[in-house]
Amino acid sequence: MFPDVIAVTPEPDHRLRLTFANGEHRRFDMTPYLRYPVFQRLRNPGFFGLARVDYGTVTWPGEIDIAPETLYAEAVPD
């Protein structure tokens, strides 16, 4: 089981600074995901900046989210 995301800070170049429930801080690059239709709205930096934490993962308006296990597994330590 992967730890929940408890805080997110959107950064330039479609990166997320994440804090997990286990105390780890990591960075996640959303760039490879922007080619998928569900994430295309995130190409807009203003919309990307609306990232927030709901239910242990990162979400955006319009029911856009990404699995917390993906965030944890693919993020690099900060």
Image (cartoon, grey):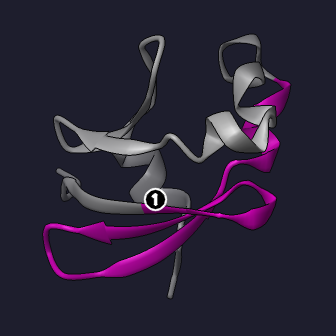
Q: Secondary structure at mark 1?
A: helix
- The span shown in magenta is 9-35
Q: Is residue 11 above or below residue 4?
A: below
Q: Nearer the viewer, residue 16 or 76?
A: 16
Which residue appears at 40% of the width and 59% of the height?
72
Which residue appears at 69% of the width and 48% of the height?
30
Quarter of the view holding residue 14: bottom right
Is 4 left or right of 7, judged from the image as shown? left
> Residue 40: percent from the left, percent from the top?
77, 21
> Residue 70: percent from the left, percent from the top?
47, 46
Give the residue pinned by disc 1. 73
Q: Is residue 51 above or below residue 55?
A: below
Q: Nearer the viewer, residue 71 or 42?
A: 42
Which residue appears at 40% of the width and 67% of the height?
18
Q: Is residue 67 above or below residue 75?
A: above
> Residue 42: percent from the left, percent from the top?
70, 32
